[in-house]
Amino acid sequence: MKTLQELRRDIDAIDDEILVLLNRRSRLVIEVGKVKAGENRDFHVPSREREIYERLTAGNPGPFPNEAIRSVFREIISASLSLESPMKVAFLGPKATFTHLASLQHFGLSAELVPQKSIPAVFEEVSKGRSLYGVVPVENSTEGMVSHTLDMFMESDLKINAEVLLEVSHDLLSRTGRLDDVKKVYSHPQAIAQCRNWLDENLPGVPVVDVASTALAAQIVGEDYTAAAIASEFAATLYDLKVVRHRIEDQVNNFTRFLVVGRKMADRCGDDKTSLMFSVKDEPGILHRMLEPFAKRGVNLSKIESRPLKKKAWEYIFFLDLAGHISDPVVSDAVQELKNYCQFVKILGSYPRAK
């Protein structure tokens, strides 16, 4: 049996090999970038990333865990893309929000992540070409849909390129780390709503103040020794706070869904989801007629959400998520039939289903 020192020398040697291979890969990536530039191709192709992840996990003999492969290669791909061209991504900021964490999860540490003050600002950054992609929240498993994001799709031509599912875990943060010191709590309204029972039981009578983001709450608390913030553990690191209590959310399996928006439709990958919006008049039987084109073709609908049309009373915008890509014949045929019952239909995007 080898000694500990010998095993560590073997690991060091392997790490040196990995470094050599990473640089060899990087040189190839630079060549790919030159070819793309010469042929005027997009430098970022999300479907190619997914192919890499799926090929590697399918061929992984172990014992390196499959779930870690995506994390490792996400950073390798992120760093490689930065060699081809800086990838600028706008997100609903500030830093240390859950949207920031979702952006890091999807694009890696080497992307240039640019915080924006509002959801419309994210859409504007991408629409005007200042950022290649934007990341915005669209739905929480506890609190439901984010109406501001849905509203933006009514007036924007951007397409959904991907979705990101992030488990949201809320911590109570303060400067001292002591629960007895907390005389006021700051956070975003959704985070407060997700922790309401815990607050009532553990901090009864303590004022709770709404602010624009969980990260802003952490910033405020950084200067107030009598206050606490509901935010992520990442925010504690960024703003030099201590964790008073971990995981104070009322519901386990609390997930938020984020959308990655861009100016082009994503390529078909074989495990896709399509989102669309359409408008109908409120009349008897209309919901049945809307859903029938999908039901008779066996197209699975994963979500339907309605919003009142602001300019006309008693008329509604519906948002629909379904399985498949708009290029799939059964999906395109169903959407074409749907148009017969609608005032308008708009495809918001077809994109890989989050796993």
Image (tube, helix red, strand yellow):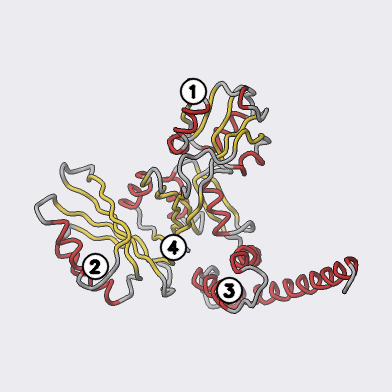
- Residue closer to the observer: 61 or 216: 61
Q: Mark 2 points at which residue?
A: 335
Q: Which of marks 3 and 2 is nearer the N terminus?
A: 3
Q: Residue 85 in the image: x percent, y percent? A: 61, 64
Mark 1–mark 4 distance (CA, rounded to whole Å): 44 Å
| Numbered circle sitting on residue 204 | 1
Q: Which of marks 1 and 3 is nearer the N terminus?
A: 3
Q: Mark 4 points at which residue?
A: 161
Residue in the image at 84% along x and 68% along y: 12
Quick check: 219 above or below 21? above
Q: Earlier in the sequence, mark 1 or mark 4?
A: 4
Q: Name the residue under label 3.
A: 57
Q: Residue 246 in the image: x percent, y percent? A: 59, 39
Q: Which of marks 1 and 2 is nearer the N terminus?
A: 1
Residue 81 seen in the figure? no
Mark 4–mark 3 distance (CA, rounded to whole Å): 22 Å
Residue in the image at 52% along x and 25% along y: 203
Disc nearest the viewer among 4 and 3: 3
Which type of secondary structure does the marked residue at label 3 adopt? helix
Which type of secondary structure does the marked residue at label 4 adopt? strand
| 329 left or right of 140 in image | left
Determine which quarter of the picture holds residue 294: bottom left
Mark 3–mark 2 distance (CA, rounded to whole Å): 34 Å
